[in-house]
Every structure is written in structure tokens, then in C-alpha cells.
Amino acid sequence: DARVTQTPRHKVTEMGQEVTMRCQPILGHNTVFWYRQTMMQGLELLAYFRNRAPLDDSGMPKDRFSAEMPDATLATLKIQPSEPRDSAVYFCASGLVPGAYGYTFGSGTRLTVV
Amino acid sequence: AQTVTQSQPEMSVQEAETVTLSCTYDTSESDYYLFWYKQPPSRQMILVIRQEAYKQQNATENRFSVNFQKAAKSFSLKISDSQLGDAAMYFCAYIHAGGTSYGKLTFGQGTILTVHP
């Protein structure tokens, strides 16, 4: 089965360090999402792309977060500088709009900022 | 903005029994898609069932079925013959089928389901 691949699976970093999370969407999918999951806030949409163009990043703290798709096989989410409140699980998902069959999720990156 | 509400933070069920998880949503659109995702302790998000808003017939997938009430904006999930492997967090989700948020996926807060042997 085709899958969305996220790396790393786990990341522990010190406050103030840069963190980069990567996502390889399923080949042929034209829409990519980044979500953050925490106990308090649930699943929050951070950003999403269609055909590599950013459509909505209103859920993302602009001062420290950035999301890009340098090519169709790679999406990145960067945090610089990281803070303890960024500790969460970050999910990438991909699919074909309008999403009638849902989107496929990666296994997530568990980020811990100490 | 479209919102999805799951009013039951936690539910529990005995093995082999039936349980219903509730979901309501707020939208001004007539065309959209609804989903239930399952997230077991492994944290993998698994699509359980989907419903197209223009279809009146309720979707079913083996032991999983939905009760879709479009006018009431309600989309509940029924799990029949519950199994221990059904224990997970369940998310209700909405996808815009048109407009400026075309294809955007919005989740409810989730319901933790416990299955007792």
C-alpha cells in the first residue's frame, strides 16, 4: 500500500534549537496538510498546500514556524527557535482534492522540546 | 468557519455490545464530505468510514455504520459487536467540497472509546 512517510518519528531537542520535520506524500497526490496534535488543543491545522502552493497557513505561528514544498515529493515544517510549548505530535497528510475519499496520514513526528 | 463538535470526550462499551459516538457540525455549504477516523495507541490515523453529503443513504462498513442527518447537521458513528481492537480515539471530520476552503479537512475534538472485556 502507498503511504505517507514522515521523518523523524521522534525528536528531542533543546529550547532555541531549529527543528525540521519532513514528509514524503503519496506520489500523485496534489494536496498536503500539516497538523499538530496536543492533549489540550486536539488536532490543529497548521498549513496546507495544493500543487505545492500554500493555500492556508493561518493556523501556524508565523514568527517561528515555516512550511514549504520544495518539490512534489517533499514537504517540510520548520520551527526556529523551538520552545517547550511546541512539544506535540506533528502529522502530515496527503490526498487528491476534493478529498472525497479522505486523506492519508503519516505516522507523525513526536517532538519534545526541553 | 466550519466547526465540528464531538460532545463526548469519553465513552465506554462492553465487548460485543453496540456503542454510538456523536458528532455535529456547523456549515452553510450544501456539498461536503464527512468522515470518521480512528487513532489507536500507535497514533496512526485510520479512515473508518466516509459519507457524501448529497447521498441520503447512510454509509456502512462491516460493523461500522453512520446515522447522517443533514438537516440536523448530525453525523453519528455506530459500532456494532464491539471488539477490544476498537479501543481508540475517534475523530469526526469534515471536508469542504467547494468554496474558498475547497478540500480543507477540519476535525472534531475526538472521543476516547474504551472497550471492556
Image (cartoon, grey):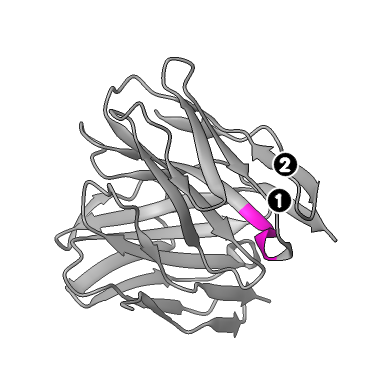
Q: In this view, does A91 lie above or below B34?
A: below
Outermost top residue: B71
Instruction: Judge left or right: residue A110 versus residue A95.
Output: right
The reply to whether the magenta stretch includes residue B46 is no
Question: Which residue in the protein does label 1 denote?
Answer: B112
Q: Decide: marks 2, 1 in contact (CB < 8 A)?
A: yes
Residue at 31 percent of width and 44 percent of height: B104
Residue A106 image point, x, y percent:
43, 71
Position of residue A12 relative to residue B9, above or below, is below
The circle drawn on residue B9 is 2
Dot 1: chain letter? B
Q: What element carries label 2?
A: loop
Residue, x 37% and y 30% (percent of image)? B57
Q: Which of B2 and B9 is in front in this view?
A: B9
Specify the subunit that label 2 lies on: B
Which residue is more in the foreground, A61 or B76? B76
| In the image, residue A86 above or below residue A20 | above
| Image quadrant in which you'd find residue A1 | bottom left
Q: Position of residue A49 (x, y in %)?
A: 24, 57
10 Å crowding of disc 2: few (<14), some (14-19), many (20+): few
Q: Which of marks 2 and 1 is nearer the N terminus?
A: 2
Amino acid at pointer 2: Pro
